[in-house]
Image (cartoon, helix red, strand yellow):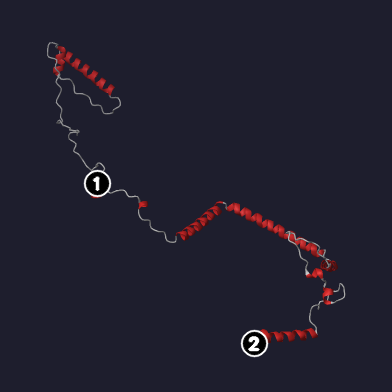
Amino acid sequence: MNRLVSSLSRFSLNSLSGRSLHSFTASTSVVTPPPPSPQIIHSILNPDVDRAIRLPPTLRSPQIYTFPTPERIQKIEAPAPGGIEPIEKLDPLEQKSPVVDPSAGKKTPMIAGPRLLTIRRKKMKKHKRKQRFDRDYFKYQKYHRAKKLNSEREFRAKMKEILGELETFDPMEYVNDTIKRSKREWSQELAPTGRKLYPHWSQLVSLEELYGLETSDYIDKRAGLPNDEDREQIARQKEEYTKKYTTANIKN
């Protein structure tokens, strides 16, 4: 009988230890259950006996954990910033003050209105001009470059023409042309504008007939200057004029 009990106990220990090691292969320290008590073995061998299993009591004292529920949570309110109490939301009140149209009242007269408008207009024109210049800066630079280039070309062409005229200038031909133009007789009855032309005194009488000179092509540089007799007569006429028509003599 003792041999049978010892063999059964070994068999149960081997089976239990094999299962525990098989189920906890990943852990290094395995906790093995305590060996079965003799009461369990006795109940297995004697099926007529009560098969109730009594486990050993735990060594730790039981601990009770309580979790907060909605009934136990207290209402927490955060304080308002700056110590201001929260304002309750209420329905909008009726507007007590009447709405007045500002244009219906007395208008304040604008002093120097036209002048202010003129100043405003000039400022806006200046502002728009500056905006246009900033926007089209490269366009204006291109225009000025082309303008300077055209003026330079015109200047060079004019200087070339003057130099060419200087090289081909003939003094004798210039004198003959001047004399020829001085003898020109005008026969146009109407001006280019359509106005009727009246003859000049130089067309009616020549200088030779006016002064009693001989007809010639010679140009005297001293022509028109008074001689000694004419100079004395002019001085005498000046003296008579100052005596008769000056302010001091008229008062006396």
Q: Where is residue 158 in the image (x, y as percent from the top left)?
A: 74, 60
Question: Where 28 sits versus 156, above or below?
Answer: above
Residue closer to the observer: 28 or 213: 213
User: Where does the N terminus fall, quadrant-wise?
Assistant: top left
Is 148 displayed left or right of 3 in the figure? right
Q: Position of residue 6 (x, y in %)?
A: 18, 16
What label does residue 170 carry, if any?
none
- The three-letter amino acid code for the residue at tag 2 is Asn
Question: Which picture quadrant has residue 245?
Answer: bottom right
Residue bearing mark 2: 249
Question: Where 219 sits versus 79, above or below?
Answer: below
Is 43 displayed left or right of 32 in the figure? left
- In the displayed orientation, state which residue is furthest to the top: 48
Question: Where 124 sits versus 198, above or below?
Answer: above
Q: Marks 2/1: CA distance?
A: 110 Å
Q: Which residue is drawn at 64% across and 86% down?
A: 250
Q: Which residue is drawn at 64% across and 87% down?
A: 249
Residue closer to the observer: 34 or 124: 124
Residue bearing mark 1: 80
Question: Where 135 sits versus 44, above or below?
Answer: below
Q: Residue at x 75, y 84 (%)?
A: 234
Crowd tier of the residue under label 2, counting other residues whose Cα lies within 10 Å: few below 14, some 14–19, many 20 or above? few
Question: Which picture quadrant has residue 68?
Answer: top left
- The three-letter amino acid code for the residue at tag 1 is Ala
Is 68 displayed left or right of 214 in the figure? left
- In the displayed orientation, state which residue is furthest to the bottom: 252
Q: Callout 1: helix, strand or loop?
A: loop
User: Where does the C terminus fall, quadrant-wise?
Assistant: bottom right
Please state which of the two labelled residues, at mark 2 or mark 1, is closer to the viewer.
2
N-terminal label among 2 and 1: 1
Mark 2 touching mark 1, by CB under 8 A? no
Crowd tier of the residue under label 1, counting other residues whose Cα lies within 10 Å: few below 14, some 14–19, many 20 or above? few
